[in-house]
Image (spheres, grey):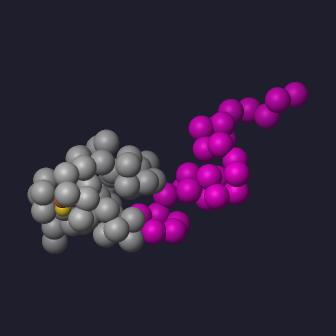
Amino acid sequence: MFVCSCFGVTEEQVRAHADAGACTPRQIASACKAGTDCGGCVRRIQALLGRGACPRRELIETGRPPLAAELPEAA
Ligand code: FES
């Protein structure tokens, strides 16, 4: 089923980008342009991303910078 009719992006494609690490509609847009024309699909993309869809989201919500999560602790 199409999520973004402006760019012909399907639900499966959005899920694949989410599995590859896209956590926000902006990151989905960077990956496939979905949401960058009329914007009518952005809420559907947000719903697909949902809570728990991205492992980094938990870090963001707890206030920890996601990119620093893989760095060793400072001694
Ligand atoms: S439906 Fe996605 S940008 Fe228009």
The single residue placed furthest to the front in the displayed view is 38
What is the quadrant of the C terminus in the image?
A: top right
Q: In the rendered structure, which segment of residues is drawn in magenta?
A: 49-75
Q: Nearer the viewer, residue 71 or 43?
A: 43
What residue is at 16 percent from the left and 67 percent from the top?
2
Q: Is residue 34 visible?
A: no
Q: Where residue 23 sits in the image (x, y, percent)?
A: 45, 53
Q: Please provide percent x and percent y for residue 56.
A: 56, 52
| In the foreground, 48 or 12 | 48
Farthest-out residue, top:
75
Q: Quadrant of residue 16?
A: bottom left
Q: Residue at x 51, y 68 (%)?
A: 51
Asked if residue 25 can be seen in this view, the reply is yes
- The residue under the point 64% across, 58% down is 61
| Position of 42 relative to 23 (above/below) | below
Q: Residue 6's x, y, as percent? A: 12, 57
